[in-house]
Amino acid sequence: MFLDTFTRIILGNPSSFYCVASVLGRLNSTCSWRGVSTGVLRPVSEGSRRQLHGLRKLSSFPVVAVAARKLEDAQQFAKKHSIPQVYGNYEELARDPNIDVVYVGTIHPCHLKACLLFMDAKKNVLCEKPLAMNAKEVKDILACAKRNNVFLMEAVWTRFFPASAEIRRLLAEGELGEVKMVRSEFGAPVMHLPRSMHKELGGGAMLDIGIYCLQFTLMVYGGERPQSVQAMGVCAETGVDETVAVTLKFSNGRLAVFTCSSRMLLHNDASIVGTKGNIRVGSCS
């Protein structure tokens, strides 16, 4: 029931339904469950609201509980969305025997602790991106998932957009020939948000926004790791990266370039160039 964490993507029709449906569909097929009960962590996040919207479209998978560090936040979210059970801490949610899957929507630095807590409690986990703050934390999370034999997935929802599925189909059928270049950019002015500005909250453009560009590149190149990475960026006064430009070199002379920014609005598009054809993914905004 374990999924590799390094195969995700970006861009397309903005609906979280595809991500949630795929996750719960995989759980249902691998576990032979008739239904899955879901808990939500950190209800104040935008990601939590998107995932709840997706779950509401799946009547077989009810959201049965919500937890937050502040009980009043959980109570407010539960009342608004008709969720029956409320917890004022994460440990109580982990002990709830009626919970099969937990969506973790905490700030980035809290992902490691939350994922370990729930997977050690034998809960399946859908964790908001980025999965962790660094490679060591990722390895610890993956090891915990394997040790407990539970489902783990990073919630990069754009991987499940229809546009993403169509791109994978065209690549698999060789419509573009050999892909030689991948280009993408994603930028939005979000530096006014504390979580974007401060290191202790996991701030920075690369972790929050650049991950979409990186995962788009890795999807196109089949998960291959680049031979070399070059990056240049500009940091805010708090020390977090606010704009980053990255060049990646892959085998057989293939390249990828992307730009991400949490300071400015960019074109927010992508293109794939092959020897037989090109794909351009326009902005969904």
Image (cartoon, rainbow, N blue to C red):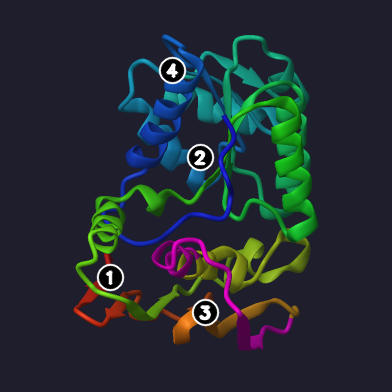
- Where 280 sits versus 46, above or below? below
Disc 2 marks which residue? 48
Which of the two labelled residues, at mark 2 and mark 1, occupies the earlier sequence position?
2
Determine if the magenta segment contains residue 85. Answer: no
- Real-space CA distance between mark 4 and mark 1, rounded to the nearest whole angstrom: 33 Å
Q: Which residue is mark 4?
A: 62
Image position of 210 with respect to 4: above or below: below
> What stretch of residues is rendered in magenta?
215-237
Rendered location of residue 127, percent (x, y) = 59, 42
Residues at marks 3 and 4, CA–CA distance in whole angstroms: 43 Å
Query: Which residue in the structure is indicated by mark 1?
Result: 283
Task: Give yes or no for contact between labels 4 and 1 (Cβ–Cβ under 8 Å).
Answer: no
Residue at the spot 41% in from the left edge and 19% down from the top edge: 61
* Residue 161 located left or right of residue 42: left
Q: Badge 3: how crowded within 10 Å, few (<14), some, or many (20+)? A: some
Please state the horizontal and vertical placement of residue 197, each as a whole percent of the image: 66, 71
**Which of pointers 3 and 4 indicates the residue nearer the eye?**
3
Q: What residue is drawn where x is 52% and y is 24%?
A: 78
Q: CA distance from mark 2 to mark 1?
A: 23 Å
What separation in Å lies between label 2 and label 4 (alpha carbons)?
A: 14 Å
